[in-house]
Amino acid sequence: MSSLPHIARWQGRPWAVALSILLVLTLSPLGWIQWRQFQMLDGLSSHQVDSIMWQAYQLERELGRLKQSVLEARNPATPVGAEVLAQRYEMLLSRVDLLTRIPRRDLLESSFEYQSTVSLIQAFVALADPLFALPQRLVDSPEQLQRVSEQIDQLELPLAELTREANRAVSRFVDERNRQLRQQGLLVIALATVQILAMLLFVGLLVRHIRRQQAQFDRLQVLSRELAGARDQAEAANRGKSIFLANMSHEIRTPFQGLLGMLNLLDEPNLSGQQRDYLQTARDSALHLLGVLNDILDVSTMESGTLKLTQTPVHLRSVIEEVDSLMQVAARDKGLELRVEAASDLPEWVVADATRVRQIMFNLINNAIKFTPAGRVLAQWARPADGQPGVVLTVRDTGVGMNAETLDRLFTRFYQADSSLRRRIGGTGLGLEISRNLARMMGGDIQVSSQPGMGSVFTVRLHLPETTAPGDAGFAPPEPGSSRRLRVLVAEDHPINLKYMSILLEKMGHEAMFCEDGQEALQLLAMQQFDVVLLDYHMPVLDGLATTEAIRQLEGAAAGIPVILVTADVVNDTRQRALEVGVNGFASKPLQASDLQRVLQRCGLLDDAGPALVPGAGLERSTSPFPLSSYEMPIRLPDPEIEAGDVIDSEAYTEILSMMPQDAMDEMLDTLFAPPDGTLQVLLKALADGDRAAIGHQAHKLKGTAMLLGFRLIVKTSAQIEQQAAQEDATFGKSTQTRLLRDMEQTQQALRYFVRRA
């Protein structure tokens, strides 16, 4: 794959490819010519072409010397020894051998002179060998010397002609070689000319390319300056967006504090069943809207890059158990089995953002419950199977499942896998995207596998480093009402929130003084003593951060007073800037009693961690040792331990019981519960038959009777069934029957509780 960019660059410049091919075509013949010239020179040096003429001449000369020696041997006046004569003959034979064995004898072999001369030499050798074998006898025999001399005379002329033929052969060879060299030289000149032209063309193209590159570089410089300006504008816009998010969060969530606070304060034990149902509906709607707002703000902060994780030591099993207990209610409402399991080797304490870990777990389990009409949901925490550090959360369900197209687009923002199903179930389509982004911020990711009708499996891998328990991790919540009474200064400019916080602090047992801005708070601190200051972030005159900075510059003990910032901001750098100016703690809007109790404890202002709530005050309580704020848990679920007072409106039921004889009450209860004609039993049968008209009618009857008796759970469930039956595309599964039967069982258990108490 690494060669692809190079190929792309070559393909983008065809002239470079053509020029390269031209250079190859010219350089290849030049190389071949040089190789041929080398071979020719090597052949001249190794084959010794010019020695052919020299060897022929030497053979002719040695024949003359042998003739001279034979003549001297015949002349008594100049006798020659037999050894000298034999040596001359041997020299002649050696010259013959050299001529016939020379490497380039092929230049002579085809000539008549060579062939005839070699034949004469062979005949001479055949005659002379026996004679020269006995050189002394040859010297002593004039007749034999005469015969040798005659044979030598016959060889002289052919050898002379052979020498001239060798000279001509060498000349022809040299002429041919010179001709080839001239041709090769001309070819080299032509190829060199082509190369020069190609190089000139290449230089011209290179110069043009450099000029274009320079022009492109100049354009890139201009573009870079423009991009730098655009980047500055984008950063300014991003900062503006962050400020807008902070302001929008404040402006939207601040009214929620008053709304939810007042709804909590309205939750009194003496409410009628209808009033409590209205109150719960309003609270659920407000919390659902707050959850949608939280999702949108989470996505916005992720886009702006301002969302940061707050890493602290977290007791992982407590977080898991907390989510488990809160989600069990939602599972039971649909008649599902929810199992949350933690492996025995799971780390006890990890470094994590507990809020975001809970958010991931809530989103996945909540989705599984939403899209599982029947069966069960299983959430398992374990270490990674591959031995890598971290933890793995696997959420399995037996729900409707998803096809391949849905899986591909599952994490797309606002994607609706099934529009009709979404309309019935609800949701913003942001939860999975937020969860995946949070998982990636924790060094992990989310994977999913599913098939239609076979359920889904979500696997979340998180890199949560193990750690040891912090020094203050071992506190135990004491009994309510044991915390100290505080004198609290509250700076809040919203009138409804002022009213709510006044009632909240009063019911928590604290004394409060209120002001509308930071400047007034500074004046009050200069005149009076307080235990803690609660500051709203967005206030006129001086905001929360500026007020905190001014408090730290006061003289005396007031400079060290604990400051708690109450904010609805979702911009992460707010916390960092607040810490830099000296804020001691944070509480999110909408402010809940449990949130305020927790932050007061963390600031060391209470004797213990117990919630200082007045029994029966109607304020929301948390059963978890780590209570959640409304921002941490977008949709607050009810307490999983359903008490008798939550099932039956005790006031309404007691009033009916006091008005009716016991036998009449028993008859009314049988009319409601007893098979086969009891209203609830008839409704169950209609649900089993799928008769929408009968379901709506019987649900309406059941709701009226249950409302009269104060049976809260049955009123709520029958109202939901009646509302659903009014829809044309309504479908009722087994989970509806299961929920109705469970409500009946819990109501009957609560009735037994009232009987025992009576």
Image: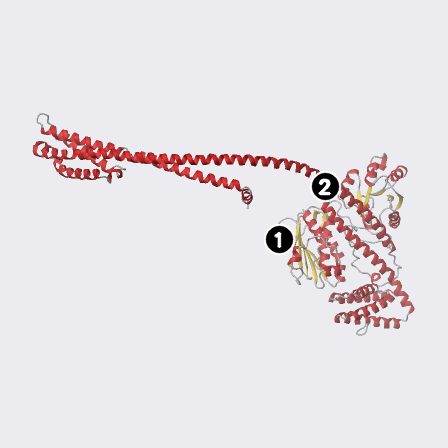
Residue found at the very far top of the displayed protein = 77
Crowding around mark 2 (Cα neighbors within 10 Å: few <14, some 14 to 19, many 20+) is: some
> Is disc 2 placed on a helix, strand or loop?
helix
**Residue pointed to by mark 1:** 385
Would you say 156 lies left or right of 167 here? left
Question: Residue 219: which quarter of the image?
Answer: top right
C-alpha span from label 2 to label 1: 44 Å
Q: Which residue occupies 89% across, 65% down?
A: 654
Q: Where residue 283 sits: x, y (%)? A: 83, 56
Please state which of residues 573 and 177 is positioned toward the viewer in this rendering. Answer: 177
Seen in the picture, residue 708 relative to 379 is either above or below; the reply is: below
Mark toward the start of the polypeptide (2 vs 1)? 2
As drawn, the label of residue 42 is none
Residue 601 visible from this viewpoint: no
Observer able to see residue 70:
yes
Left or right, 47 with respect to 517, comes to left
* 341 shown above or below 464: below
Specify the amino acid type for callout 1. Answer: Ala
**Which labelled disc corresponds to residue 234?**
2
